[in-house]
Image: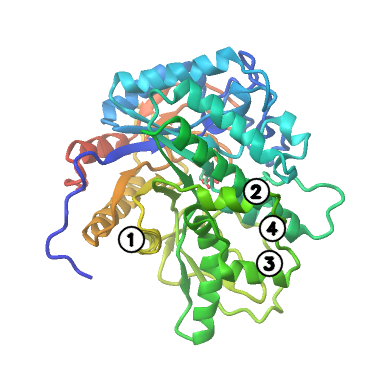
Amino acid sequence: MIHQTLKPFPKDFLWGASTSAYQVEGASLEDGKGPSFQDTKELPPGTADLTVSVDHYHRYKEDIALMAEMGFKAYHFSISWSRVLPEGIGKVNPKGIEFYNNLIDECLKYDIEPIITMFHFDMPAALEEKGSWSNAESSEWFKEFAQVLFENYGDRVKYWLTINEQNMMTLVGQLIGTLRVPEATTNLTKEIYQQNHHQLVAQAKAMQLCHEMLPQAKIGPAPNIALAYPNGNRPEDIIAEQNANAIRNWLYLDMAVYGRYNNLVWAYLEAKDATPTFAPGDAEVLKAAKPDFIAFNYYTSFTVEASDGSEQIDDKFADQQSAMSEPGYYRSVQNQNLKKTEFGWEIDPVGFRATMRALYDRYQLPLLVTENGIGAYDELTADGKVHDPYRIVYLREHIAQIQKAISDGVEMLGYNPWSAIDLISTHEGIKKRYGFIYVDRDEFDLKTLKRYRKDSFYWYKKVIATNGQDLSDQF
Ligand code: BGP
């Protein structure tokens, strides 16, 4: 579909960027914060620990001033569960509550809309000890946490996201380190999908509670959605593509929006003797909860072909974006039409439009982009500059596709790429940088932690100032 005239971005489009608590804050055990899984996990070799991260906890005022200078309309960040509830449940930490009050107020001072993710890969260590998401009580723990957040911040926060990338925790939880497997587990797939079920119930309870407590607020899920393509036009590859989309994408949103398990995924789980057990009341809770919008993270698309089930999967080097295969259902392959980032992730802006179209077609809910971006080895020059033309190209091409999606009739709420500021990557340390703002630190040397504006900072400032109309190179 070629549009002769593109529709403009909506006037109130939420231009901003994202971070997550453990990757940006630091102060990992300060002011009463309890440890989270991120503080107790085994670090990927050669990567920074998270005690200081980029020290946003102490420097948030400076950081938000820089975001305001870029013209941000929104700042999407996550709340550390164990900072507000050090044990995960029970006693609230007043200093933790105060920190996020300050952060929210600082955003509002500049008319920046705070967009909050409630859970981003950081289960409180105290709840890890109780079995984390494998414990059927986990949905109640999450509801209690949600209540604390709504009570304390609901007067000012309009946009809430439940669980970041639940699908990645389910599909590659072992690789990103978030999965806890109880010792007695015999059927790993069943265990993983039982945990996934608990998360779906937790999300549904939080969505319902939000609507009860904060009728003006909006809440939605935040999976990582990458449309799966068939590799070629063999009919068997189309079946594989449908399997891949159901297992990777639609399971999570069909449940969030329609309160039912996707039938292809249910059939897949039956074949593996891995269907989740419903506790009394789960079905009703899942059915009753409704999101107001869909937030999603997009980095790349995903290409698959038919699998005869015989292949050996070596996912030792996989990560949350790289290829995943499911023997007998789909085999992931590289897409020869796409270039890759320095870190091996395929770059597919057109796939971004295709993903937005598919999401809207299927769910008819407004969309909010909560992550998108390019990880790279940025360099600080002697005169304090960071020239990151590759980031400008990546963002420009993706933003252009949003405008095309808008012109296709897709309702878009905002764009919050990853990341507002450099932070510690999920498992590749600080060397893999994403921010508009460079932070002067290395993997193991904290250096000055000084902030520098990258070229992309000035460019994005111009994009926001023109409401997405000027995407040219000049800044
Ligand atoms: C997403 C996570 C983020 C972030 C991003 C980039 O999956 O939600 O936490 O880290 O990916 O990934 P990485 O840091 O591995 O490059």
Considering the numbered disc 1 on the image, is that residue within a helix, a strand or a loop?
Answer: helix
**Real-space Cα separation, disc 3 to disc 4, in angstroms:** 23 Å
From the image, tell me which residue sits under label 1.
353
Q: At 72% across and 33% down in the image, what residue appears?
A: 127
**Real-space Cα separation, disc 3 to disc 1, in angstroms:** 30 Å
What's the mark number on residue 21?
none
Crowdedness near tag 2: few (<14), some (14–19) or many (≥20) residues, C-alpha within 10 Å: few
Looking at numbered disc 4 in the image, what kind of residue is underneath it?
Answer: Lys
Q: Is mark 2 within 8 Å of ligand 1?
A: no
Q: Earlier in the sequence, mark 3 or mark 4?
A: 3
Q: Quadrant of residue 313?
A: bottom right
Crowdedness near tag 1: few (<14), some (14–19) or many (≥20) residues, C-alpha within 10 Å: many
Considering the numbered disc 3 on the image, is that residue within a helix, a strand or a loop?
Answer: helix
From the image, tell me which residue sits under label 3.
269
- Describe residue 362's horizontal placement relative to residue 36 as left or right: left
Q: Quadrant of residue 220?
A: top left
From the image, tell me which residue sits under label 2.
281
Q: Earlier in the sequence, mark 2 or mark 3?
A: 3
Q: Which circle, 2 or 1, is nearer the viewer?
A: 2
Looking at numbered disc 2 in the image, what kind of residue is underneath it?
Answer: Gly
Q: Earlier in the sequence, mark 4 or mark 2?
A: 2
Instruction: Say whether marks 2 and 1 touch (CB < 8 Å).
Output: no
Q: Which circle, 3 or 4, is nearer the viewer?
A: 3
Q: At 60% across and 22% down in the image, what residue appears?
A: 83
From the image, tell me which residue sits under label 4.
316
Q: Which circle, 4 or 2, is nearer the viewer?
A: 2
